[in-house]
């Protein structure tokens, strides 16, 4: 039986970071990862690539809507070509978890595939902002999870964390909630713990009437680019700090890699906050911007 672990969560919540931690617990299993990128250029696949791990990228759409058939065919190909012990699925940040569950179950492969866990990563720092602005598909990811892992807890105080937990419990009364700082979680046996929890898909989820969020998603677009310029940390900081400008649109996420005199800079912009780090990995410069009402020409001109 092939186990399926789904790692869901809104844009920039920390899904890829969690998967990188989860890979630390692989011992003697053959694992395949399905990575779904909303943009035309894949970013996260480069971040989670590891020796012995096959990463298949589905780009330029969401597996629960525009590339649904591609997702189905990919799963069937994985079973035939790789016959893994476990499949890790990371949907795009605006994917409906309920729809992904339904798609897996509708494959009618109960003797071959088993949903092992449904993890939703919840951005503790931006939680209430996202609930207010992206309610439907944000709440769908929470309500249908078996495990809720709160990220960025080190950046919020205890009272705020308690408010986030209380809200999560109101939305999902049965999920296991993990609120620890991820740096303090022993991930070396994470898969063993997931297997013991033995996720069961309730009839409530199967009977769930899925909301039509096509209108909500219609405004969310992505811009991709391969930048050639060599950036300093300071010049990249200047760009990222200016993204929180209404004239450029509502930028939810901007991520990627750019050239630097000493190698490659990896950057991540989420809802007004950003990080920049140097990496020695052999990665082609590329970036993706996701948001609504994006000023495409202005944004592309910012990254040369």
Image (cartoon, rainbow, N blue to C red):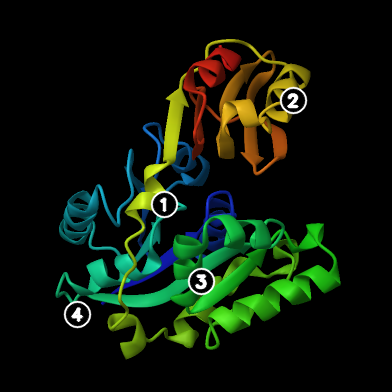
Residue at image location 20% in from the left, 75% down from the top = 112
Judged from the image, the secondary structure of the residue bearing numbered disc 1 is: helix
Label 4 Cα neighbours within 10 Å, binned few <14 / some 14-19 / many ≥20: few
Residue 234 location (% of width, % of height) = 78, 20
Q: Is residue 4 left or right of residue 127?
A: left
* Helix, strand or loop for disc 4: loop
Residue at the spot of label 3: 142
Q: CA distance from mark 4 to mark 1?
A: 33 Å
Q: Nearer the viewer, mark 3 or mark 1?
A: 1
Query: What residue do we see at 77% from left, 76% from top?
Result: 162
Q: Which residue is mark 1?
A: 216
Question: x and y percent of residue 228 in the render?
Answer: 53, 11
Gap between marks 4 and 3, in whole Å? 25 Å
First in sequence: mark 4 vs mark 3: 4
For the C terminus, the quadrant is top right
The CA span between labels 3 and 2 is 33 Å
Please name the residue that numbered disc 4 is placed on.
110
Q: Is residue 159 left or right of residue 112?
A: right
**For the residues marked 1 and 2, what is the alpha-carbon distance in whole angstroms?**
31 Å
* Mark number displayed over residue 237: 2
Marks 2 & 4, CB-CB < 8 Å contact: no
- Between residue 271 and residue 201, name the one nearer to us: 271
Labels 3 and 2: the sequence-earlier one: 3
Q: Tell me how far mark 3 sits from mark 1, CA to CA.
A: 17 Å
Determine whether, in the image, residue 59 is placed left or right of residue 192: left
């Amino acid at each position: 039986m092939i186990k399926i672990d789904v790692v869901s969560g809104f844009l920039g919540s920390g899904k890829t970071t969690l998967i990188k931690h989860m890979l630390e617990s692989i011992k003697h299993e053959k694992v395949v990862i399905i990575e779904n990128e909303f943009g035309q250029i894949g970013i996260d696949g480069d971040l989670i690539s590891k020796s012995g791990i096959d990463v298949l990228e589905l780009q330029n759409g969401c597996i629960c809507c525009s590339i649904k058939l591609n997702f189905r065919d990919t799963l069937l190909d994985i079973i035939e070509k790789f016959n893994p012990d476990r499949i890790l699925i990371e949907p795009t940040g605006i994917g409906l978890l309920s729809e992904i569950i339904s798609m897996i179950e509708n494959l009618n492969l109960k003797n071959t595939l088993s949903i092992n866990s449904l993890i939703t990563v919840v951005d503790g720092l931006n939680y209430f902002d996202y609930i207010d602005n992206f309610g439907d598909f944000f709440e769908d990811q929470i309500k249908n999870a078996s495990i809720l892992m709160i990220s960025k807890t080190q950046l919020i105080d205890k009272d705020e964390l308690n408010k986030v937990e209380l809200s999560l419990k109101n939305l999902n009364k049965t999920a296991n909630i993990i609120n620890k700082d991820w740096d303090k979680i022993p991930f070396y046996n994470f898969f063993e713990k997931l297997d013991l929890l033995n996720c069961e898909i309730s009839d409530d989820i199967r009977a769930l009437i899925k909301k039509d969020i096509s209108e909500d998603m219609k405004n969310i677009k992505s811009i991709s680019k391969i930048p050639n310029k060599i950036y300093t940390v300071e010049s990249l900081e200047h760009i990222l700090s200016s993204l929180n400008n209404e004239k450029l649109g509502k930028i939810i996420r901007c991520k990627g890699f750019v050239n630097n005199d000493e190698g490659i800079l990896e950057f991540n912009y989420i809802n007004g906050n950003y990080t920049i780090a140097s990496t020695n990995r052999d990665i082609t410069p590329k970036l993706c911007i996701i948001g609504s009402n994006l000023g495409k020409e202005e944004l592309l001109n910012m990254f040369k």
